[in-house]
Amino acid sequence: STTNTYDVSSITYGGSSSGITLIRKDGQDGDGISRNVALYYLKNPAAGNKQIVVTFSGVVFAAQCGAVTLEGVDQTNAIDVRNGQVSDSEDPVNVSVTTTVNNNWVVDVVTVRDETGSNSDPAISADGSQTERFNRSHPGSDFAITSGMATKGPNSSGSVTMEWDISVTSDKETAIAAVSLKPSTTITLYRSVGTTATALASGSGNALTISGSTATFGSALADKIGVGDVIQYDSDGND
């Protein structure tokens, strides 16, 4: 966002601020105007269509906000690494994070302020290796801003760069922040076969034929057959 130096005072998800945590904030104040970016996260949010409300500590000139949901994130230690920077000359604007785990996802947010007085929105576009999540502009009489968010992943461990091309070649101010999120290390075990008919995938009787070391079911089982599934059968070999 580009604001009159006011910070975010609260964020709510579905009416609650519980669990919403600041990851990183980058920005710079100048001439009574600041350009700031910030990343927050919420673990295991409630499912459904929820409204996100961002409140500032004062009246701001402009702000853009967005959100993205990622599945399979480590719920105990979600944050891998984070980084950010502000600049008056970077083009393209970029930031790198040196991730420590495989299959990580990187999320970034960027804002660009055009100080040329053209009252035209600065165009930005994420690098082709990233997926843009939002890209919004706000014109102004003395300056205009555009902000965006993107994701990239899954990535191997090592350096990951988030980059945006911008249309303004001079008199610009930028801020960008990025975070790498760790994947969950939890392995889900599925038990598709049990000792009773209701434990079978079909929910009812499922004829089983044993021939040597091969077990053949009369009806197909679920796709997710877990490690450690057990088959018990009686002397007739068909239960």
Image: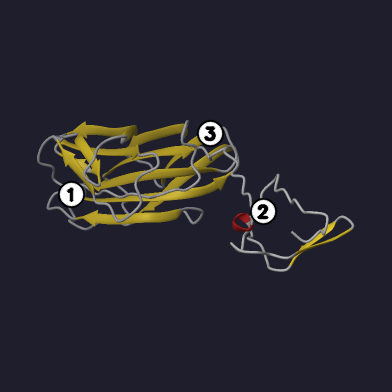
- Tell me: 31 left or right of 232: left
Is disc 2 placed on a helix, strand or loop? loop
The amino acid sitting under disc 1 is Phe
Q: Residue, x 57% and y 45% (percent of image)? A: 155
In front: 50, or 103? 50
| Residue topped by disc 3 | 98
Q: Secondary structure at mark 1?
A: loop
From this view, report whether residue 69 is shown above or below residue 78: below
- Which residue is nearer to you in this view: 228 or 153? 228
Task: Please tell me in which quadrant of the rendered image residue 89 appears.
Answer: top left
Q: Residues within 10 Å of mark 3 (few under 14, many from 20)?
A: some
Across and down, in percent, residue 216 comes to 78, 63
Residue corresponding to mark 2: 193
Give the residue at x 63% y 49%: 191
- First in residue order: circle 1 vs circle 3: 3
Identity of the residue furthest to the left in this view:
59
For mark 1, does the 10 Å Cα neighbourhood hold few (<14), some (14 to 19), or many (20 or more) residues? some
Say whether residue 125 is visible.
no
